[in-house]
Image (cartoon, helix red, strand yellow):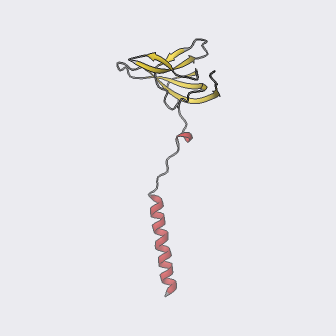
Amino acid sequence: MMKKIFKKRVGLTLMASLLLAGCVSVEPSKKDEFTVPKGELVRYEVDSKLYDCVGVGPQKCLRVKRGGSDEWSFFYSQIEGFEYQEGYRYQLLIDEFPLEAIPDRSAVGYRLMRELERLKVVHI
């Protein structure tokens, strides 16, 4: 009699566990996802500090060298997936892709594909 009750409890516990396990969803982390470029892959060098600039209004901008250029230029947009930290110079691989034209917004989107290098810079 005790064996029968024990078997029923074990069976019910096992069934309940399986039902609960079926309700759990597992999503991959962002780092596990393979991101396919939407546009052109371009290498960017990002300077170690932010600069005052004027776009639609006064703002702080990154200063970048695009695609191996020797010339620094202000970067007014955001780079999706890139978390800038002042005091570091970066080498990045960026996906540049077309966006729908909207007033006061760039027609190009920018997404970080890979951080190639991050170098600590000491300003004197």
Residue located farthest toward the top when viewing the structure as drawn:
71
Image coordinates for residue 3, horizontal then vertical, percent: 52, 84
Numbered label tally:
0
Residue located farthest toward the bottom when viewing the structure as drawn:
1
Q: Answer above or below: position of 39 versus 12.
A: above
User: Which sits in the foreground, 110 or 55?
Assistant: 55
Q: Residue at x 52, y 45 (%)?
A: 28
Q: Residue at x 53, y 34 (%)?
A: 35
Q: Residue at x 61, y 16 (%)?
A: 68
Say which quadrant the C terminus sits in: top right
User: Which sits in the foreground, 106 or 41?
Assistant: 106
Residue located farthest toward the front when viewing the structure as drawn:
124
Q: Residue at x 54, y 29 (%)?
A: 84
Image coordinates for residue 19, horizontal then vertical, percent: 45, 63
Image coordinates for residue 42, horizontal then vertical, percent: 56, 21
User: Which sits in the foreground, 122 or 5?
Assistant: 122
Left or right relative to 118: residue 108: left
Image coordinates for residue 1, horizontal then vertical, percent: 49, 88
